[in-house]
């Protein structure tokens, strides 16, 4: 119907992959999503070691998941972004914790829903994120703005190379440094990011050179101090 304000009649199909550990929750949310004419459930799964591959194979546009609710570990989210460039991620069942929110905001998560989010709020988040909007509690958004303002005042947001040019750290470099900060070995980093150990070593050397650090751990400390690795 031309000019309709009903999102279920006017929006193109939104392909969503649902990733959750609890079976009852998966089934309930899947049924909820399938009832919407503008949403297609591209896949449903529990959280496993092959979850990222399942999500990639589904060709979904949005991942709706509670994979970070247990300990706020961003490893799976990083893996998802690495394997599926352009995917949009919505986390649900989250705590109202500023540090955790900032960590996932830096990764590029588009939706952050709290444990008390209603079914209507989850549906609205899926539709909003699909259109390019962010979905997060206003208080946490303000905390992020304040965090960025403080970091901007306290530290420059760029690192200086020997030739004097300045550039931001890449997303891959931040992923790698996050794993170094967790104590991962080159072999473990290579496996997590689907790289060779040789490539990992080259990345680390390049980062150390960019920030003028003598060791990988000194590089982590310097980048963390600049605000690039919040909460890690």
Image (spheres, rainbow, N blue to C red):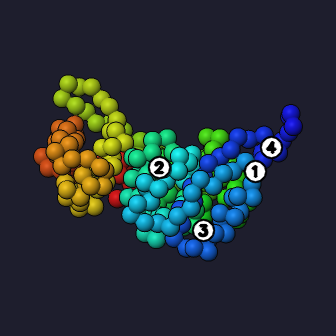
Give the residue drawn at x 43%, y 69%: 71
Give how far across and how far down residue 47 sits, in percent.
46, 66
- Count neighbours of disc 3 (C-alpha within 10 A) and say few if under 14, some if 14 to 19, many if 20 or more: some
User: Disc 4 and disc 1: Cα gap in Å?
Assistant: 7 Å
Give how far across and how far down residue 173 sits, in percent.
30, 43
Q: Which mark is residue 37?
A: 1
Q: Is residue 67 above or below residue 220?
A: below
Mark with earlier residue (3, 4): 4
**Dot 3 lies on which element?**
helix
**Dot 1 lies on which element?**
loop
Q: Which residue is mark 2?
A: 56
Quarter of the figure that contains the N terminus: top right
Mark with earlier residue (1, 3): 3
- Count neighbours of disc 1 (C-alpha within 10 A) and say few if under 14, some if 14 to 19, many if 20 or more: some
**Dot 4 lies on which element?**
helix
Q: Which residue is mark 3?
A: 26
Q: Which residue is mark 4?
A: 9
Q: Is residue 110 left or right of residue 48?
A: right
User: Disc 2 and disc 1: Cα gap in Å?
Assistant: 23 Å
């Amino acid at each position: 119907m031309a000019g309709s304000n009903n999102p279920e009649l006017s929006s193109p199909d939104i392909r969503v992959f649902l990733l959750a550990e609890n079976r009852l929750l998966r089934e309930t949310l899947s049924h909820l999503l399938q009832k919407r004419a503008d949403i297609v459930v591209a896949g449903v799964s529990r959280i496993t070691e092959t979850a990222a591959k399942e999500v990639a194979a589904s060709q979904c546009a949005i991942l709706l998941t509670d994979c970070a609710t247990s300990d706020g570990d961003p490893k799976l989210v990083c893996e998802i972004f690495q394997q599926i460039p352009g995917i949009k991620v919505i986390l649900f069942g989250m705590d109202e914790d500023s540090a955790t929110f900032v960590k996932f905001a830096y990764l590029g998560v588009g939706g952050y829903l709290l444990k008390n989010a209603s079914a209507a709020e989850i549906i609205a988040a899926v539709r909003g994120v699909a259109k390019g909007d962010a979905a997060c509690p206003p208080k946490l958004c303000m905390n992020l703005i304040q965090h960025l303002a403080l970091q901007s005042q306290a530290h420059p947001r760029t690192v200086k190379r020997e030739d004097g040019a300045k550039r931001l750290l890449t997303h891959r470099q931040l992923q790698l440094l996050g794993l170094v900060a967790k104590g991962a070995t080159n072999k473990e980093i290579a496996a997590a990011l689907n790289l060779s150990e040789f490539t990992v070593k080259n990345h680390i050397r390049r980062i150390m050179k960019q920030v003028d650090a003598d060791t990988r751990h000194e590089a982590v400390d310097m980048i963390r101090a600049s605000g690039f690795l919040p909460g890690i």
